[in-house]
Amino acid sequence: MEVIPGIYQLKLPLPIIPLGDISLGQVLGQINVYLIEGNAGWLLVDTGWDAPKVLEAFKKGLKTIGITFKDISEIVITHVHLDHFGLAGKLKKLSGANLGLHRMERRFIEPGGLKGEQVLKKIKEWLYKNGSPKDEGLVLQKVLQGPMKFITPMFPDALFFFGEIGFPDIFFSGGESISTGIFNFEVIWTPGHSSGHICLYEQAKKVLISGDHILSQITPVIALNPFSRSNPLGDYIGSLNNLKRLDVELVLPGHGDYFVHFQRRIDELIQHHEERKRIILELVKEGPKVAYEMASEIPWMPEKGGVSLDKLDPCSHRMALMETLAHLKILEEEGNVKRIYKANLDFYCSTAGKNVGYYSL
């Protein structure tokens, strides 16, 4: 679909990737990638998952537009989650294009010799100290032997990448310009959903390619885990506030429909997280709790009226735990919550009233 003259949106399928009782394809449905016309070649933003049917859908999209792989001269990745990055290696080889992503994503494509068993051990320890029941376990109990070549930030123990890594020619820091001769995009670093997430802003056309930073209907997952930045929700809120300065009339997201209510959507996302923080503050006022206990008392999926944790699958339990920890971390940074390590567990309590002294070790 040509969303505006010269910018095409391709909706690519997501394969049925099992994560416990659910599938990644069932959760997200599709991934949006964007082909942008240029005078000397086309710009591709994101690539889709590395799977045969995804590559076939991509080929059909190119044919519909009337271009070939060789017409693509530059590939930019908003973040290295596999639904956005997986095909980068193959498409780079097929097109000969330059590949660029933010420098903060480098650690995920260069794990530095980290082995699968090390990842599994780290995740197990992290789940345990935050109160996860032992019977939930991990998605995979056996992992690849030897060094890993890619870390999936959300589920580093569950999703292994067997394809060809697309090693970048360019590492962005934010503030760079990407010109096709027809469109001029500013690279904006927007950490939160991923450490090195970026958005692309076309000032003259008032268009923002938002990746997973701002979606039309669902709230992007903002998760604290052993491979995230120290305060991902703080990063995310800061990134949203930074984007408020932009004059945007059209948002092109990584999933779902494009939309026009840019400022309103930012306010909705900030309000969602303020409400979640309020709920957690009420919970910690009752006394010290581990994060998993709090996650079990939070209503999830508010767009569906709120769903309790026990109605969700084990994979979603982990995501709920990571989101709860992200909110606890920002509350800790704001001075409203205190973390206490006791009996090999992390407990959280309110800093208001008697909790401060009573629960200190």
Image: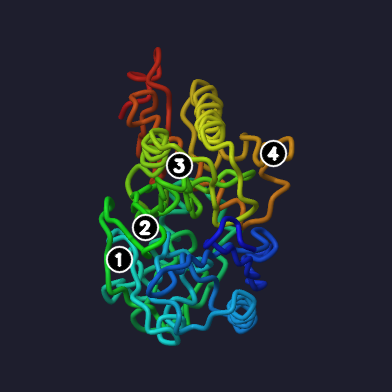
The residues bearing labels 1 and 3 have C-alpha atoms spaced at a distance of: 22 Å
Question: Which tag is nearer the camera, tag 1 or tag 3?
Answer: 1
Residue 240: image location, x then y, percent: 42, 38
Label 2 vs 3, first from the N-terminus:
2
Q: Which mark is residue 107?
A: 1
Horizontally, residue 123 falls left or right of residue 308, namely left
Q: Residues within 10 Å of mark 4 (few under 14, many from 20)?
A: few
Q: Residues within 10 Å of mark 3 (few under 14, many from 20)?
A: many
Asked whether the beta carbons under mark 4 and mark 2 sit within 8 Å of each other, the answer is no
Give 332 or 65, whichever is nearer the viewer.
Answer: 65
The residues bearing labels 1 and 4 have C-alpha atoms spaced at a distance of: 34 Å
Residue with the most extreme bottom position: 94
The residues bearing labels 1 and 2 have C-alpha atoms spaced at a distance of: 9 Å
Question: Which tag is nearer the camera, tag 1 or tag 2?
Answer: 1
Residue 218: image location, x then y, percent: 62, 45
The residues bearing labels 4 and 2 have C-alpha atoms spaced at a distance of: 28 Å
Q: Which residue is mark 2?
A: 227
Q: Which mark is residue 303?
A: 4
Asked whether the beta carbons under mark 2 and mark 3 sit within 8 Å of each other, the answer is no
Q: Give the residue type that dot 3 points to.
A: Leu
Asked whether the beta carbons under mark 1 and mark 2 sit within 8 Å of each other, the answer is yes
Q: Give the residue type that dot 4 points to.
A: Glu
Give 122 or 161, whichever is nearer the viewer.
Answer: 161
Q: Which mark is residue 325?
A: 3
